[in-house]
Amino acid sequence: MSTPSVAPARPLHEDPAIHARRWFLLAIMCLSLVLVVMSVSGLVTAIPTIQEDLGASASQLQWILDAYALVFAGVLLTAGAIGDRFGRRQALLGGLLVFGAGALFAGLASSASQVIAGRAVMGIGAAFVMPATLSIITTIFPPDERPRAIAIWAGFAGAGGAIGPIVSGALLEHYWWGSALLVNLPVVAATFLAIALFSPDSRDDEHTPLDPIGALLSLVAVGTLVFGIIEGPEQGWTSSLVVGAFAVAVTAFTAFVRWELRVKHPMLPMTLFRDRRFSVGSGVITLAFFVMFGFFFLGTQYLQFGRGYTALEAGLAMLPVPITFVAVSPRSAALASRYGAGRVMATGLVVVGLGFAMLSTLSETSPYTLVAVSFAVLGAGMGATAAPATEQIMVSVPLAKAGVGSAVNDTTRELGGALGIAILGSIATTAYRSGIDLSGLGLPAPAQEAATESVGAAHAVGASTPGGEGLVERAASAFTDAFNTTSAVSVGVAFAAAIAVLAFSRRRRDEVFVDDAAFDLDLELVAVGAGNRSE
């Protein structure tokens, strides 16, 4: 039996048995990935039913959605490091068990507080599942196939956000809200069994000690940052709660960086950011998912409130996004190899910008063909952007630290998504409130106040008020205009990101030899310093 000390002499991808089932394992990892990603957005369609059945307050409804994302993002870095140290297969299996237990508890809950608690537990499990899937893929595929495998993974990571509302919408047509959570259980059982039987284990062969102080600081930094982002639109960006959360996040992040720079075995080696592939890839993922999750959040509302679709119809109308996302992602690996990742990412961001430019022209009566083309262009651009960015992050990280590299990649997705929902959602809310015209409708003051608050409230008032059709039409028009405004903002973000990627990529080509020499020297100095400390 081989020991961990000789494992590096035969990487997992050189094992014939593992090599033979690598594509099957990729499918299992992608299924596990979609399971946790779709849970970010999947429960949105069930919120009205949960409110009616459990009598949840507006704040509780918000945290039913956000508890998952908050815990998910906060635990990712720590979960990735634990997977590297103790085994990514064990981290994946344990994460699936915790995720399934949380889904069971939340799906059978009799109060909103229990749903929130169950969703938080699901977030803990998801934080162990997501980085483990990518790090296992990275170790079982040979270098020549690795970019394509990572690109396929990235495609499903992006498509999962659009698949969630489709699955939930279909279930809610026939079952109660808990089915949107309990549907995870058979998938958890099937993937757990497949991973237990067929997946190899991989870990950091150096048995690097854990970094509990770094883990705690990262949890506080990311958790308070995401909390501030979530609460900003609700409490106000200048409220003491939000400002305090951001202050704690900045303090904890500064302490985290300083600690990681001086500790002997850092959880996240800061030297990784010297590699421009790692830093640019992380930035691209953040900005791409900023506009993408903002789109998922607002696009679903546009389809339901602007065009009058049911939850299931809205989910199905979104299908062009995941279809083109998954179709383009694997092909982007070959394009990046031929033309350079920087050019492909920049081109993808331009295509994303064009998709948002098309969305900014839609009305509530635009033919669905135009809507579908806009969605398809957006999905294609995201597929061409996210996959090379993910690959750039992973190829710049040593295989022994694949879990941490994957966790950084996943954390940037979650932070970008949370920022996109919060900031673009705030812009849409402001635009809607300033654009809704209630004059001449004869609504009482409480109804006017509710209708001005949100498009969903306006539809509820219109449905319960005699002659409320006029209010529904005006609300649909005002929200469509707000959706156009946020799409225009996303155009600017995508184009600015494309320019920045080209600039940094060109600079890297010009400086690559100098950078590599300096980086090698830094590593030698670090090694000498570590040797001196050990003596």
Image (cartoon, rainbow, N blue to C red):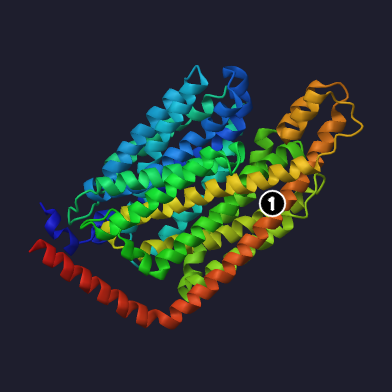
The answer to which of 294 and 28 lies nearer the viewer is 294
The answer to which of 426 and 381 lies nearer the viewer is 426
Give percent across and percent down for residue 416: 52, 51
The image shows residue 339, relative to residue 35, as above or below, that is: below
The answer to which of 294 and 355 lies nearer the viewer is 294
Question: Can see residue 174?
Answer: no
Residue at horizontal 20%, vertical 58%? 264
Of all residues, the one furthest to the front in this rendering is 240
Question: Can see residue 56?
Answer: yes
> In the picture, which quadrant includes the C terminus?
bottom left
Of all residues, the one furthest to the left in this rendering is 535
The answer to which of 29 and 533 lies nearer the viewer is 533
Q: Is residue 29 left or right of residue 492?
A: left
Residue located beneath label 1 in the image: 486
Give percent across and percent down for residue 472: 81, 33
Residue at horizontal 29%, vertical 63%? 398
Q: Is residue 483 left or right of residue 519?
A: right
Residue at horizontal 63%, vertical 57%? 378
Give percent across and percent down for residue 191: 37, 39
The image shows residue 522, relative to residue 272, as above or below, that is: below
- As helix, strand or loop, the secondary structure at mark 1 comes to helix
Mark 1 belongs to which amino acid?
Thr
The image shows residue 57, relative to residue 96, as above or below, that is: above
Of all residues, the one furthest to the right in this rendering is 440
In the picture, residue 435 is in which quadrant? top right
In the picture, residue 23 is in which quadrant? bottom left
Q: Is residue 313 left or right of residue 215?
A: right
The image shows residue 197, relative to residue 333, as above or below, that is: above
